[in-house]
Image (cartoon, grey):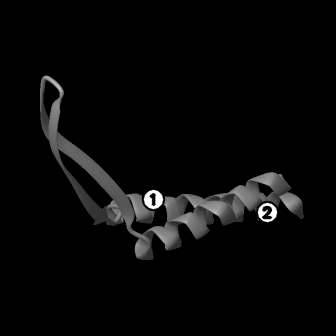
Amino acid sequence: MKMLFWIGVAFVVLGIASLFVAIPQTQNEGVKVGDLNIGVQTRQKEKVSPIVTAVLIVAGAGMMIGGGRAMR
């Protein structure tokens, strides 16, 4: 059950990191006519939904508690 504790730690760390780190997204849009190619590339940075972050942190804490109690 020690593994469950460490997986919980990883979930909590990922949840906390998702509060601060934005995920980059790149979109390509364009038109191709024969050999001619005209396009625009846009980049956006979006943060993860707060609901997903909360689920990661709560699930990780639950795994840590469950794994910690099983080690005793």
- 65 lies left or right of 43: right
Q: Which residue sits furthest right?
A: 72
Q: Is residue 42 above or below residue 18?
A: above
x, y percent for residue 34: 13, 23
- 11 lies left or right of 58: right
Q: Residue at x 43, y 76 (%)?
A: 20
- Look at the numbered disc 1 and give the secondary structure of its residue: helix
x, y percent for residue 68: 79, 64
Q: Residue at x 50, y 60 (%)?
A: 56
Which marked residue is nearer to the observer: mark 1 or mark 2?
1
State the separation of the CA atoms marked 1 and 2: 21 Å
Which disc is residue 3 wearing? none
Res. 38 image quadrant: top left
Q: Which residue sits furthest top?
A: 34
Res. 71 image quadrant: bottom right
- 44 lies left or right of 16: left
Res. 48 image quadrant: bottom left
- Look at the numbered disc 2 and give the secondary structure of its residue: helix
Neighbourhood count class around disc 1 (C-alpha, 10 Å): few under 14, some 14–19, many 20 upward: some
Name the N-terminal-most of marks 1 and 2.
Answer: 1
- Amino acid type for the residue under numbered disc 2: Arg
- The residue that label 2 is drawn on is 69
- The residue that label 1 is drawn on is 55
Q: Residue at x 59, y 67 (%)?
A: 12
Which of the pair 33/25 is nearer the observer?
33
- 26 lies left or right of 60: left
- Amino acid type for the residue under numbered disc 1: Val
Which of the pair 37/66 is nearer the observer?
37
Which of the pair 2/34 is nearer the observer?
34
Which of the pair 41/72 is nearer the observer?
41
x, y percent for residue 22: 38, 68
